[in-house]
Structure formats: C-alpha cells, structure tokens
Amino acid sequence: MAWRISTDEDIKDLEMAVGMSEAEADSTGWRGTNEGSKLAGNASLWTDGALEDDPEFGISGFDCLAAGYRSIDASYGNRSGYAFLWSSTEYDSSGAWRRYLGYTHTDVCRRDYDRAGGFSVRCVRDTTTGEDSDADGTIYTDDYAGNDGKTYDGIKIGYQVWITENLKETKYEDGTNVPRIIDDTEWENDTDGARCEYGNDPENGDIYGFLYNWYAVDNVKELANPSGEPNTAPNSPSNPSPADGATGIATDTTLSVDVSDPDGDSMDVSFYNAFDDSLIGTDTGVASGGTASIAWSGLTYGATYNWYAVADDGSDTTQSSTWSFTTSALTGTITLDGTGVENAIIIGYNETTDTYLGKTTTDVNGDYSFSDVGVADDIIHISVQYDDGTKYGRVKTIQLG
C-alpha cells in the first residue's frame, strides 16, 4: 500500500475511472468528454466557464483546484483559470508528463513540459483487497500523513486512493527541507528541487497547495511519504559516556550516546551543556542503532558538568535525561632543591594544559614548590629568572606520576 507521487499511468487510470476511454487516455492534447469537469472541484475558485457549467462538475470528489502555475521564466499565471498537475514520469531529458484542466474545457489535456515549471502535485496509492469493493467516492479520513506530519483525507476512485487536496509539504521523506524559492533567477536555475506558493503568497499555499518544480517531484529524497504513516519521534538517547555520575574525567573528553529511531530514520544528534543550554556540538547523519559523539574540550579541573543530548530525525526531536560527571582535580605538589639558585624567581608552566602555574621564590633552605600543578602524565617545566634579568632558562622538566 505504498504511497507515491502519481505517475503518468496513475493519472490515466484516474481518467479512465471517471469515463475516459483507454485510447483517449493514451493520446495527447485535449482528450475525453467531461472528465475534466468531473475531476475539478470547488466552483467558487474557478472562473465561470464550460468546466463548472457541466452538470457533473465535481462528482468524482478528486477536487482539482485552479491553482495556476509558475513557468520556466519564474512568472506566475492562470490561477482560477487552470489547474496543472505534475506526474512523476519523465517525457525526455528536459521534460515530464503533466495534466491540466481549463475553465473553458470540460475535458483533460495531456502534454509534456519543461522540468523547471511549477505545478501542483498529488499522492496516490493502490486500494487494498478490503477496499476494492468500497464505492467510488468513499472517503478515508486522515489516510495519508505527509513528511511535515500534515494529514490528508483519501478518496477511492477506481482501484486507487488519492489525497483529496494538493500537496502542502515543506520536507522530503528524509526530513530535509524542500527549498522555498521566491527569487525569479534562482527558480529558473534550480535543478535540485524547489517549491513556492502562487505569487509567493503563503495564503495561496494554504488554499491551493504548493507549486513544485519537477526536480522536487523526482528527487531521490522522496517528496511522498511511502508509508503514509505519521513520523514517530526518535527514542531517547541512552548509554551516555562518560557514565552518569562518573568522576576523574579528563578536561578534554568525548561525549557519546546511543541513538535509535522507530522508523529507522537517520538523526542529527546535538549535545548541550545543561548549565546554560548552550550547544557543545552536533554529530550529523547518525544511523538508527548507532552511536553519536562529540568532543568537549577545555573543561576546568575538579568541576562537575551536567549535559544532555537531543536526537532529531528531521521531523521530531527527543531529548535525553540530564547526566553529570566530574573532572579530575588538580593534584600534586612539586618540591625541588634550589641549591645554587640564590636571589632568583622560579616560574612554573604546565605544557600539557598550557597553564601558567605562577611564580615563587626559594625558601631559606634554597627549596621551592608549586601546588595543584596538574594530573598524572602532565609535563611540567620549571624555569629560573635572576633579579638582574641577566639569566633566564629552563632548569627542569618533570612528568607527573
């Protein structure tokens, strides 16, 4: 029961279900008798003419609206007069099949058009065995959930179920955005997939749905949600590292969590400092069942940190619990024999952490010391400077044990 953007064959089946012959459906140009009137809907949004004057106007329930188009030069036209519908079937290397209804016609036109054009889009699925015997016009409430989470009613026509309104999706199935392009030049040059509202007016999008170029229709990211089911939010990130309550953690550490998604979606996982909710970093494109990680550097010795992670599948987000860890405290006191170093200033430096330890002087025994200099394996340099400034140099290098 996979949902899809309607193919050229799907639309032929639709046309034949409302009365067009197979020979007419296979032909091009204006074909049929009053199938266009049957497929149209909402007369108040159509210009007066033969289409809505037909006594069978709107009887199919397909409810095709006069949404107009955006041309290859990015101009808009024919809202209230024409409805244009993309198929997902290419015509040649530059064009694809489309359909359109016109207010002066009761029939349906089948032609190709350049892929840069902006038209309406519908999703369709095949009926299930249990639905085959349902009457045409049967409405299945909230039958299709799009990639944004919006739900659409479905209507049975023949052996197909169609959504009853034009698509209004801002995202692909993988959660990435379908760019909204309003600039004319950008629209003309786009080959990646784009959407817009007629006249760049969001109110028209609410009424008529969006206009998509064919590059969005054909995008491998999928404009349709094949399952038709609402997105399920990711599971809460788990198995934190460092473990909750851990101590003795290095001041340069790596945070990690395990993530999974009920729908199998990949996720962007962001890590936050719970003290001020500031972003530490984001691991992108993590597969369901995988591990996300990010480096957190420059932490303070002997401090407790609280953090959490947020998994984002492109449609929904889930925040983890808040966890904590404590970094290693500065340890160790260096006491060294300063014999032979009179009237001198002793300078300490932790090379590992790039930390200045301060200055001290020798005591009455010629010794000197520094406290809280670092942790195990840190490299400490001790230098001496005489009062007259005539001599300065490193006298000792120590690795803390």
Image (cartoon, rainbow, N blue to C red):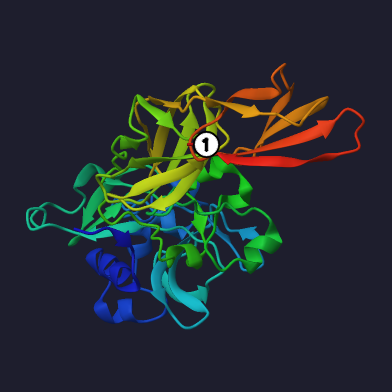
> Which residue is nearer to you in this view: 78 or 252?
252
- Secondary structure under tag 1 reads loop
In the rendered view, tell whether residue 208 sits above or below residue 303: below
Q: Would residue 254 be found to the left or right of residue 359 on screen?
A: left
In the rendered view, tell whether residue 391 sits above or below residue 104: above
Q: Quadrant of residue 127?
A: bottom left
Q: Would residue 68 be found to the left or right of residue 326 on screen?
A: right
> Which residue is nearer to you in this view: 70 or 35?
70
> Which residue is nearer to you in this view: 264 or 290?
290
Q: Would residue 131 be found to the left or right of residue 77 on screen?
A: left
Q: Which residue is drawn at 35% across and 53% down?
A: 57
| Residue 109 in sight | yes
In the rendered view, tell whether residue 276 sits above or below residue 205: above
| Residue 44 in sight | no
User: Where's residue 62, x and y in %?
Assistant: 32, 53
In the rendered view of the protein, which quadrant contains the N terminus?
bottom left
| Label 1: few (<14), some (14–19) or many (≥20) C-alpha neighbours in 10 Å | some
> Which residue is nearer to you in this view: 3 or 77?
3
Q: Which residue is drawn at 31% across and 43% down?
A: 259
Q: Name the residue under label 1.
A: 400
User: Where's residue 290, x and y in %?
Assistant: 31, 50
Q: Which amino acid does label 1 sit on?
A: Leu
User: Where's residue 60, x and y in %?
Assistant: 28, 54
User: Where's residue 366, x and y in %?
Assistant: 71, 23
Q: Would residue 160 be found to the left or right of residue 220 on screen?
A: left
Q: In which quarter of the image is residue 23?
A: bottom left
